[in-house]
Amino acid sequence: MPPQSSERNRTDYDVIIVGGGPAGLNAALILGRCRRRVLLVDSGNPRNAVSQAMHGFLTRDGENPLEVRRIAREQLRPYETVEIRDGEICEGRCHGDWFELREADGKWLSTRKLLLATGLLDDIPDIPGFAELYGRGVYNCPYCDGWEHRDRPIAVYGPGERCVGLALEMTLWSRNLVLLTDGPAELSDENRARLAGEGIRIVEDKLAGLDGAASLERIRFETREPIEREAIFLNYGEREGSQLSRMLGCEITSQGTVETRSYERTNVPGLYVAGDASRRVQFAIVAAGEGALAAFSINNEMLKEDLLR
């Protein structure tokens, strides 16, 4: 049965953090240094698990993201009030000034404050080769992986008008570009002219699959000859890494992320969201910074509550 008492000092933890990526880990570090009782629950399914290297993170540029997570966990060991648990939170409930969460094994946990750092997951086309080469020639973020393929043959994949912006953006990294619409493009005359003006060719044939061993080598079509490409960048969509924010009543933006206010607060008192699930700038270093901001705010909020008892 879930816990029944709403007294702050009867909760299992001061803070439970759901998600063990840069946002969650950095928040745990700040809160550990404040001697808060913290539980971090990590499902072990990070968005960047397939990435060969993490980029744009000062002092960690080019390192394997799983190795960065290992180092972060190791650096949390000295903080005896911080506990890390591999597992999954399946349900959440809000009771005014405390929260209860259910683990996959049915156990209920209680906490004064809750930080969701569950991130997003990328949608991948159901076409042979996309999933197999994801992170090894198939990417969704040019800021993360564009530089490594600068001035090389690059494809952009995405149906409809939404792919136009990404194709134009990719001219920063390469001028050898082709836009793959996987069927009739349905682009406006204006956008076709913009793409043509930048030398971006449009291929409207249906894709049959991607080929490559260690990385992407070529793209096959149903009705035309294959083309050689070194990388393909997607604009195909993404989804929340967890439904907890919706269960707990968070406001969701039109882009599908959680609406957050200053210091990563949500509309639910005591509930914070940091990282990719709350922002459109989805960089690891930004997620880590948001985790630190949330931790600072959470600690100050608890200090005020305790001093006003």
Image: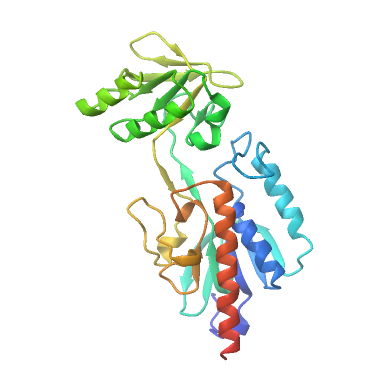
Q: Quadrant of residue 261?
A: bottom left
Q: Is residue 115 above or below residue 219?
A: below
Say which of 189 and 105 sits in front.
189
Residue 188, percent from left and from top = 21, 29
- Which of the image's four quarters has the C terminus? bottom right
Residue 6, percent from left and from top = 53, 84
- Residue at image location 54% in from the left, 44% down from the top: 47
Check the image and tell me how it is coloured.
rainbow
Say which of 259 and 82 sits in front.
259
Say which of 40 and 164 sits in front.
164
Q: Is residue 142 above or below residue 75?
A: above
- Which of the image's four quarters has the N terminus? bottom right
Which residue appears farthest toward the top when viewing the image?
Answer: 225
Q: Is residue 111 above or below residue 44?
A: below
Residue 233, percent from left and from top = 45, 29
Asked if residue 102 lies left or right of residue 177, the reply is right
Q: How many marks?
A: 0
- Residue at image location 73% in from the left, 70% down from the top: 81
Q: Is residue 82 above or below residue 161?
A: below
- Residue at image location 70% in from the left, 43% down from the top: 67
Asked if residue 139 lies left or right of residue 196, the reply is right
Residue 52, percent from left and from top = 63, 33
Task: Note whether residue 106 is visible.
Answer: no
Task: Note whether residue 55 is visible.
Answer: yes
